[in-house]
Amino acid sequence: MADVSDLSVLLQIEARALEAQTLAALRFTIVNETHALTPYRQAAMFELDGDRVRLAAASGLVSVANDSPFAVWLSQFAQRLPRDGTVHCLDHADAVGEDAKSWAEWLPEHLLWAPLPDRNGVSQGMVLYAREQAWDDATIQLVQRLHATFGYCFAALHRSTQRSWSRAGKLFKSRRNRWLLFGALALGLFVPVRLSVLAPAEVIALNAMAVAAPQDGVVGSFAVAPNARVKAGDLLFSLDDSALLNRQQVALKSLEIARADAHVAQQRAFDDAKSKADVAVALGRVREKEAELAAVDTQAQRVEVRAERDGVAIFADTNDWLGRPVQTGERVMQLAQPEDGGILIWLSVADAINLELESPVRLFLHTEPLSPRAGRLIEASYQASLSPDGVAAYRLRARFDEDTELPRIGLRGTARISGDWVLLGYYLFRRPLASVREWTGL
């Protein structure tokens, strides 16, 4: 027998169902909020579509993908369940054949198959609840009572939707109203609008200075964090100098040996005139080893990379670079001024339109979609290249307007670039016409 708390939860869920304004809201309430009355692991709602059942909602999902493997099997499984308008308890032990195998893979052991009856008791749909515990009689009675309310709400919203379409159909049965509609649509096609296109964008520094590896080596350590402010002369990163230190020690020992050999040759030259020729060779070898040591010392001095000017250090993550081999001239980071922010846009070739410099640009950041930033186009590449997403695109750059609040460098979003003024009909049918010409060649 249900206790007072269960009845309170039942009334709350019924109130939520009665407040639903759309079928989508009611479906969400049925498959998700029923859990407060009787816990379950999964719930799926099916609606009748002629002689078949159609998966309409599932717990924990905003929308269902009917082509997923689970959805396909569940729809086929529900097609074989009874539709006599009564609640059924189903156990995995009673399943046979392929149903038993798939049931064990996708669903818990115990199922509850509950209809959504209308006022005449005719089932409009069904809901499948699945959990590990067996369904007791008290829970079944609560679900049956709740589904009576669900069915009433479903029928009311379904009739409301049908009446709306019926009123719209009656409105355009009149020949006069149809001509008025067609005339309004035809005139609307000649309304001038501004051609625009959307493309992924990123906030960048327009005049950033690249900081590259001064020589071949392995990145050993970073002295700054990403997006940290630095001053001229501050240490940015260092290359691993262990190999250079070893080479320096070897060059130093080689120089000492060459100097000792030269000293011996000079001593011999005092007693043996024939040994004077060896002195020049020994001194030449000393100069050679001195040059090798000087070259190693010069490389050791370039292990540390320092900032040449004030700015913000822009790079992804220190862990992406530590221990990574780099080549001479390879860019490791950038130094940028925060007030030098701009917009980098990758306009795909398929969406390209004619653009002029100073065309308006509006940037909608993912972090602030309701606060767009205004800017102007200052650069557009003539040749397409691969974007970071691997799409053939044109590289566009824009600067922010003077009165626009500058966002942080590195933020991403979507940019809308405005082009020429065109008719609404051209705006709507530009892409379909291009596709037709691509396929037909006309």
Image (cartoon, rainbow, N blue to C red):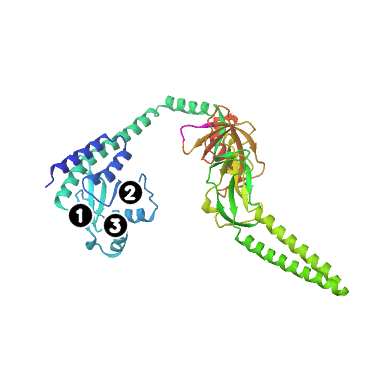
Instruction: Give whichever of discs 2 and 3 has the lower sequence position.
Output: 2
The single residue placed furthest to the left in the displayed view is: 1
- The label number, if any, that marks residue 266 in the structure image: none
* Local SS, label 2: strand
**Residue 392 seen in this snapshot:** no
Quarter of the figure that contains the C terminus:
top right
Q: What type is the residue that disc 2 sits on? A: Leu
Q: CA distance from mark 2 to mark 1?
A: 20 Å
Residue at 35 percent of width and 55 percent of height: 70
Rendered position, 346 above or below 176: below
Rendered position, 71 above or below 349: below
- Tag count: 3
Q: Nearer the viewer, mark 2 or mark 3?
A: 3
The boundaries of the magenta stretch are 368-373
User: Residue 13 in the image: x percent, y percent?
Assistant: 23, 40
Instruction: Give whichever of discs 2 and 1 has the lower sequence position.
Output: 2
Q: What type is the residue that disc 1 sits on? A: Cys
Rendered position, 326 above or below 385: below
Q: Is residue 127 left or right of residue 440?
A: left
Residue position for label 3:
107
User: Residue 259 in the image: x percent, y percent?
Assistant: 75, 66
Q: Mark 1 near mark 3, Cβ–Cβ under 8 Å?
A: no
Residue at 28 percent of width and 46 percent of height: 31
Q: What type is the residue that disc 3 sits on? A: Leu
Q: Mark 2 near mark 1, Cβ–Cβ under 8 Å?
A: no
Q: Residue 437 lies in what quarter of the image?
A: top right
Q: Would residue 372 be counted in the magenta stretch? A: yes
Q: Is residue 165 left or right of residue 396?
A: left
Q: Is residue 55 left or right of residue 284?
A: left
- Number of residues whose C-alpha sits closer than 10 Å to that of mark 3, classed few (under 14), some (14–19) or many (20 or more): some
Residue position for label 1:
89
Residue position for label 2:
55
